[in-house]
Amino acid sequence: MVFSLKVILFLSLLLLPVLKSSQVTLNNNGYDGIVIAINPSIPEDEKLIQNIKEMVTEASAYLFHATKGRAYFRNVSILVPITWKSKSEYLIPKQESYDQADVLVADPHLKYGDDPYTLQYGQCGDKGQYIHFTPNFLLTNNLLTYGPRGRVFVHEWAHLRWGVFDEYNVDQPFYISRRNTIEATRCSTHITGVNMVLNECQGGSCIQRPCRRNPKTRLYEAKCTFIPNRSQTAKESIMFMQNLDFVTEFCTEKTHNKEAPNLQNKMCNHRSTWDVIMSSEDFQHLSPMTEINSPPHPTFSLLQSKQRVVCLVLDKSGSMNREDRLFRMNQAAELYLIQIIEKGSLVGMVTFDSSAEIQNNLTKIIDENTYQKITANLPQKPSGGTSICGGLKAGFQAISQSNQSTSGSEIILLTDGEDNQMSSCFEEVKQSGAIIHTIALGPSADRELETLSNMTRGRRFYAHKDINGLIDAFSRISSRSGNISQQAVQLESKTLDIPGKKWINGTVPVDSTVGKDTFFVVTWTIQKPEIILQDPKGKKYTTSDFQEDKLNIRSVRLRIPGIAETGTWTYSLRNNHTKSQLLTVTMTTRARSPTTLPVITTAHISQNTAHYPSPMIVYARVSQGFLPVLGINVTAIIENEDGHQVTLELWDNGAGADTVKNDGIYSRYFTDYHGNGRYSLKVHAQARKNTARLSQQQNKALYIPGYAENGKIIPNLPKPEVKEDVAEAEMDGFSRVSSGGSFTISVVPPNGNHSQVFPPGRIVDLDAKFQGDRIQLSWTAPGKVLDKGRGINHPHLLLPSPPLPFPASRNHSSTLYVSDSYMIRTSKHVLDLQENFDKAALINTSGLIPKEAGSVEHFEFKPEPSKIENGTTFYIAIQAIREPNVTSEVSNIAQATNFIPPQEPSIPDLGTNISAISLAIFGLAVIVSIF
C-alpha cells in the first residue's frame, strides 16, 4: 500500500494543468490581472459593461466574506471586441486576448438557456479553463432564478481558481442516507426545504403536491424537486445554493456532507470545498485582513482588441542547411501566409543569422499579390551564426516602423540553434508587451526558447524532421480574437513514405460546417508526384490543376473553387521517382459561412514541464461553439526529439484520466517516456456520419425552481426546455487535426521501461445492484499502468491471502478471500470502506481475469442469506492489483439495497421503471458522487 500512497502524492502534487495561461495573481489579498472578454459577435451595449462592473464589485465583497477576509477582486480588465466603436477610454491590450481570458461573455451556439458555467476538466484542486456568461444572463433580471450575479460569479470563481466542484447533482437529486432516510443531495444538510412536485398537470389544470416514494426504488418519484426554504439558519454552502440569502460560506470539514452523491465528493475524495480552497497555492501563506470589514472597490480597465499584427522571425543560420530545414521552414511559412493567417491582418518578416534583417515591414494581407510580396523574400541560402535576440529586436522594429504598437502584436520565432546571449533581451521582451510564439526545430534549438513563450503567454512548439510538424505548428497559431469563423481549420496533415513508382490512396471528409477557402497541398522530398484529387460528386483535379511554387520549395497547392463539396474527398498520389520518398498531404479550410460555427479540436498537455516519474495527461477538446461533440475517435501522437512516436487513443468515458463522461473532453495518461527533452503533441479527431453528436454542457450553475416561504411554494419561471433533436443532434462525418504544442520531460533514466513505476488506475464508476439474491457489479477496467494496458496479472500468478478478521463492533457479510487481480470488499457500514478499507470483508474473485483498459467488467457475488433482510444495504469498493504491494487507490463506493416491494401494484405516475430489487448507487454518471 505504500507504493500506492506515493503515487497519490504524485497525482495530487504534480498534475497541475497549464492548459491555459492566466495572468491572475493574488498579491496582498487582492486578485490582479483578471480578464473578462466580450465575443466579437455581441452587439455593442454600454449596459453590458456597466453590469459586468456591478457584478464584479458585488462579487468582491461576497468573496471577501466567504474567504474570511483573505481575498477580494482588485484589478479587472474588460476586453471589448474590435467590432465595437473605438473610444478614447479604451486602452491597447498587451497580452490580454479573448482566447486567454478568464471570463467569456458570449452567446451559446444553440440557445438552450443562459446557465452560467465553468469549463473545468482537471483533477481536484486544478484550475479551470474559463467562466462563460451569456449577455442575456448579464442584462436581464435573474435574481430569483440564480441569485445575485455577484454570488454566481463567486460560485464560478471557486470552480475556476480553486478547482472545487458542485455540491448538488441534477442527475441524482436524492439519496438514501446511512440513517435510512431520503435526503436531498446538498451541502450542508442543515439547508432545509420541502420535497414537492411543482407542476402536475391533468386536463388543463396543474397542482403542487408533496412527493411520493417510488415503492420500487425507495427514493422519491422522478418529478420530485427539493424546494429550499427562503429563510435559513445555515450559512453554507456557496457550491450548493449561493442564491439563498443566508448562504455566505463554503462547507467546512465540520459541516461537509460526505454522503451526498455529488461531484465534489467524487473528485475530491470527500474533502470539503473549504479544505480544498485552503490547500490552494493562493492561501498557503496568506493571512486574513483583520483590520477591515469590507474590501476596497475593484479597479476596472477597458481594453479594445486591435487589428491582428504578426511578424515572422525566421532563422537562416548555417545549421538550417541540415536535413532540409530551410526548405521545410519555407514550405510551412508559405502555407501559413497563404492559408492560415486571417485576411486583413498585418504581417511582416525578419530573417536572422549572426545579424538580423527586416525583409518586409508590415503588409496588410488582402489578396494573392500581398502575400506573394512576403513569400518572395523567404531565405534561400543558410549561413552564419544564430542571434535570436537580434531577430527579436528587428521584429519589434518592423512593427514599430509601420506605426503599430508592439503591445498585443505577435511574433512567430522559429530557430534550430542556440544563442547564449538570449537572456540579455528578456527584459526588453517583457516591456514590449508582444506575444511570442516559439517553434523549436530539431533537438539543438535553444532550451530557453520556452522561457520567451511562457513570459509572453505565447504558444510553444517542437518540430522534428518531417514537414508536417512545422505545418501543424504554424496552423495552430491562429487569431486570438474569438472569431472562430475566420480561423483556419486543419482537416488533414499526413506524411506518406511511398516506394518508387507506386501509388497510394487516401480520403478526407469535408463536413457541412466548413468548406470556404479550402486548400489541398502536397510536398515532396525528391521529385514532384502525380496527383489525382476527386470531390464527392466525382469531379477530378489532376497535377496540372495544382499551382507550383515559384520559389522551388517542392510544394504544390490547389485552391478549391467556391465552397468545397460536402462529403468524402479522395486522393491518389504516385511517386514518379525510382526511389522511395516522403510525400505530405495537408488540407485546410474555414467555416462555411459566418453564421455556421465549425467543429474545432484543441489539444493540451497537463504540464508544460515535468520531472520523471510524474505522469502527464493529454487532453483534447472537440466542440462546435460551446457545445461538446461526443462519440468520435480521438488519437494523440506524441513524438520525442529522437523521432520516437507514441500513439494514444483518448477517451471521454469518465474513467482513468477523464474527469467527466460525455463532456467532449477526451483524455488519457501519458507515461511512455523515451529520454529527456522536448516532446510534441498532435491530435487527430475523426467521426463517421451519424456517429458523432452534439450535447449540452454538463457543468452548469444550479437553476432554482422556487422557494418555500410561510408554508407556501413560490415557483420561479420554468426553465426553457431544450428540444431533444437540438440537444443531441447528429453530425456529419468529419476530420480535424490540431497541434497541442510541446512539453519538456527531465530526469528520465537512460534505459528500460519506465512506465512500471505507476500503479493501476483508480476505478471511479463502480456500479452495484441486487438481482435476485446476488449483487451484480460493473465498472470500467483500469490499465496495468494507470489507464493503459490489460488490467493486471492473471490469477495463477498470485496466491490468495488468508481470510482477514473483522472488528467485533461491526456486522459484516461473509468472510471471503482476496483476489489476485481485483480486491473487492464489502460492508454494511460505509465508514468501514472509507476509513479502514483493508479491514472490510473480502469477496472471492479468483475467477475474474482483468480485461483491457477501458473495457466494461462484470462480476457478481452472493452475500450470506442470513445477512439479507428487506431493506438491507451493502456498500462495496474495489482495488486493482498489478503485483504484491502495487495497488490502485480505493474506488468509489457503490451502494446496493435489497428492497422487496409490496404486493400491491405501484402507483402509475411514480418515477421511472426500475428493477423491483432496488439500488442506490454513488458514482453512476458524470456528476454522480463517489465515496
Image: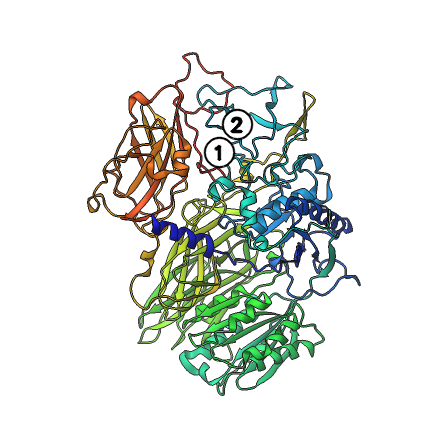
Q: Label 1: few (<14), some or many (≥20) within 10 Å? A: many
| Quadrant of residue 463 within the rendered picture | bottom left
Quick one: label 1 or label 2, which is nearer the N terminus? Answer: 2
Q: Mark 2: which secondary structure?
A: strand
Q: Is residue 320 visible?
A: yes
Marks 1,2: beta carbons within 8 A: yes
Q: Is residue 42 left or right of residue 922?
A: right
Counting from the top left corner in percent of width and height, residue 339 is at 55, 67
Mark 1–mark 2 distance (CA, rounded to whole Å): 10 Å
Q: Which mark is residue 259?
A: 1
Residue at the image position 49 percent from the left and 16 percent from the top: 907
Up/down of 621 relative to 544, above or below: above
| Closest to the observer, 258 or 108 | 258
> The disc labelled 2 sits on which kind of residue?
Glu
Counting from the top left corner in percent of width and height, residue 389 is at 57, 80
Counting from the top left corner in percent of width and height, residue 279 is at 54, 50
